[in-house]
Structure formats: C-alpha cells, structure tokens
Image (spheres, helix red, strand yellow):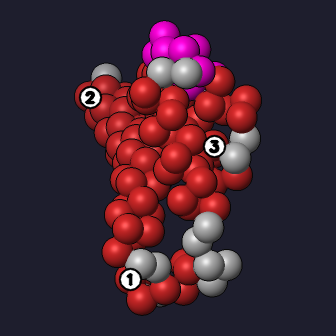
Amino acid sequence: GKMPKWEALNSELTENAKNILAYLQTGDEAKLDAYLSRVGKAKDSPEAKGFETLRREISRFPADYKESPSKKLTKEQFESYAKMEALEKQVTAWEKTKEKIKKMLWWDEWLKAYRS
C-alpha cells in the first residue's frame, strides 16, 4: 500500500539523481534548475558548467549507441555514458531496496498476526 514515509525518503534519496539524469538525457533545463536549487548552486557554478558540458557530449552520441555502447562510443563518450549509467543505477537501486523493505514489512506484519 501507500508508504508516505518511504516515499518522502525515496524523494530525498533519488530526486537529485533523477533531475540530473533527465537533464542529461533530454536537455530539460527545468530539471537542471531544480537540481541546482536543491543543492544551493548557481547556474554559473563549476558544477552546473560541468553538467552542461556533459549534456553536450551526450547529445552527440550516435542514435544507436544503446545497442553496444562500448563499440559505438569513443573512449571519451564512453566515460560520459558511464556517468549517466551510474545515475541510472542510483535511481533504480533505491527502487529495488524499497521493494525489499515492503516484503520485510509484510513478513513482520504476518508474523505478528500469527503470534497473536
């Protein structure tokens, strides 16, 4: 069911990664702005400039790069791809953890009901 405390934690743990990932993948400036606002950085900060540079690099990837990134991308492009992959893993790792927590909570509730 609904788990408001976990959803709040979910937001806290993944919101920055989701915003940067969306910006890198689609160029959504609002997502970059949301990230910068959350971390207290200015649009002209070195961190923001770094993400803008990374976004430009990613936007130049060949259209079919996902089929075989290690073969379709240059060494430099592959390094940028690896950064994007790390963000994707960060977002999905919490989703998997949350599913495990839900299963453990279900088991705990069942055990309490069984013992009473």
Q: Are marks 2 and 3 in contact (CB under 8 Å)?
A: no
Which residue carries the number 1 mark? 70
Secondary element at tag 1: helix
Kind of residue at disc 3: Tyr
Residue at left offset 63%, top offset 43%: 23
In this rendering, does residue 7 appear at all?
no
Cα gap from disc 2 to disc 3, whole angstroms: 50 Å
Q: Residues within 10 Å of mark 1 (few under 14, many from 20)?
A: some
Which residue carries the number 2 mark? 115
Q: Is residue 109 magenta?
A: no
Specify the label residue 23 is tagged with.
3
Magenta highlight range: 34-43
Q: Position of residue 41 (x, y in %)?
A: 49, 15
User: In front: 112, or 19?
Assistant: 19
**Between marks 2 and 3 in the image, the one whose residue lies nearer the viewer:** 3
Q: Residues within 10 Å of mark 3 (few under 14, many from 20)?
A: many
Q: Is residue 35 magenta?
A: yes
Q: Position of residue 86 (x, y in %)?
A: 37, 53
State the quadrant of the C terminus. top left
Secondary element at tag 3: helix
- The kind of secondary structure the magenta stretch mainly shows is helix
Residue at left offset 48%, top offset 21%: 45
Kind of residue at disc 1: Ser
Specify the label residue 31 is tagged with.
none
Kind of residue at disc 2: Arg
Secondary element at tag 2: helix
